[in-house]
Structures are given as C-alpha cells and as structure tokens.
C-alpha cells in the first residue's frame, strides 16, 4: 500500500513540476529550484514505488495518470485546446494501463534461495545407498 502512495505522490510532484516549467523562463531562481526539486522528488518516489510494484505497471500508471492530469490541467489552467482525438487517446492510454495492471500477476511471497540441504526427514531427499556411489 505504501508503494502506491509513493507512486501517486510522485505523479502529483511530476504534474506540478511539469506545469510550472511553462512559466519558468520569467520566474526567479528560487522558483526554478522548487521546480527542479519537485521533478527530482517525483523520480525518487517513482524509484521507491518500483521496489514493490512491477515496473511495467508503475510506469504505465505514472504515464497514464500524469498525462491525463497534465492534459486536463493544461486545458483548465492554461487554456490549451483539448480536441476529441486527444480525449480518445487519453481513454485508450487509461484502458491500456488498466489492462496492463490487471494482467500482471504478483508473485507469492518469494523464499530466498539457500545453500543448506533439506532436513534428513524430507521425503524429497533421496535415501542414502549403502556401498559405492554409482
């Protein structure tokens, strides 16, 4: 659950940082540093999410929700044009991300590989033979 929180926070930082790039040229240095900090934080949190969420699922979610947010906020806040073809493409992107996430199976808890032999009473262990090895 924490990994998804990392991912959603990373998306929010990436969206706000990317939106602020539009007006970065006429802003003071402190605003530029804040933008760079947001984008750096976004990638750091994305890397943290990769530890528990499969890379394909995390990156597809990152791209789909990030692009959807940027497109909608660009239309609302920046007055950018949003034609039907863009909406259709966003729908396809969200559908693809959902299908990718649905088709990814998380492995059950993995047991670390060990070099220790199985216990003597393990039925999978062959019984010792008396005499010369074959």
Image (spheres, grey):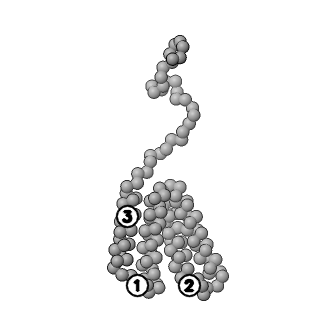
Q: Indicate whether 31 appears above or below 1.
A: below
Q: Residue at x 44, y 59 (%)?
A: 57
Indicate which disc, 3 or 1, sits on the residue closer to the N terminus.
Answer: 1
Where does residue 134 sit, x and y in percent of width and height?
Answer: 51, 17
Residue farthest toward the top in the current orientation of the protein:
131
Indicate which disc, 3 or 2, sits on the residue closer to the N terminus.
Answer: 2
Q: Secondary structure at mark 1?
A: loop
The local crowd at label 2, few if under 14, some if 14 to 19, many if 20 or more residues have their Cα within 10 Å, is few
Mark number displayed over residue 23? 2
Q: Indicate whether 69 appears above or below 58.
A: below
Q: CA distance from mark 3 to mark 1?
A: 24 Å
Taking the image as drawn, is residue 76 in sight?
Answer: no
Q: Marks 3 and 2: CB-CB under 8 Å?
A: no
Q: CA distance from mark 3 to mark 2?
A: 32 Å
The mark tally for this picture is 3
Where does residue 132 sit, x and y in percent of width and height?
Answer: 54, 13
Q: Quadrant of residue 24?
A: bottom right
Mark number displayed over residue 68? none
Q: Secondary structure at mark 3?
A: helix
Indicate which disc, 1 or 2, sits on the residue closer to the N terminus.
Answer: 2
Q: CA distance from mark 1 to mark 2?
A: 18 Å
Q: Secondary structure at mark 2?
A: loop
The local crowd at label 3, few if under 14, some if 14 to 19, many if 20 or more residues have their Cα within 10 Å, is some
**Would you name the residue on which mark 1 appears?**
81
Q: Quadrant of residue 100?
A: bottom left
Mark number displayed over residue 96? 3
Q: Is 123 on the left or on the right of 36, as rendered?
A: left
Q: Residue at x 60, y 87 (%)?
A: 26
Where does residue 5 sit, x and y in percent of width and height?
Answer: 50, 63
Residue farthest toward the right in the current orientation of the protein:
29
Q: Residue at x 45, y 27 (%)?
A: 124
Q: Residue at x 40, y 54 (%)?
A: 104
């Amino acid at each position: 659950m924490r990994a998804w929180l990392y991912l959603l926070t990373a998306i929010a930082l990436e969206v706000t940082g990317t939106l602020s790039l539009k007006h970065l040229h006429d802003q003071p240095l402190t605003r530029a540093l804040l933008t760079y900090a947001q984008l750096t934080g976004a990638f750091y949190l994305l890397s943290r999410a990769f530890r528990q969420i499969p890379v394909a699922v995390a990156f597809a979610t990152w791209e789909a929700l990030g692009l959807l947010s940027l497109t909608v906020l660009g239309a609302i806040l920046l007055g950018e044009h949003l034609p039907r073809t863009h909406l259709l493409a966003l729908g396809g992107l969200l559908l693809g991300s959902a299908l990718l996430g649905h088709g990814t199976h998380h492995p059950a808890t993995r047991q670390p590989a060990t070099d220790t032999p199985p216990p003597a009473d393990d039925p999978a262990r062959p019984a010792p033979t008396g005499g010369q090895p074959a």
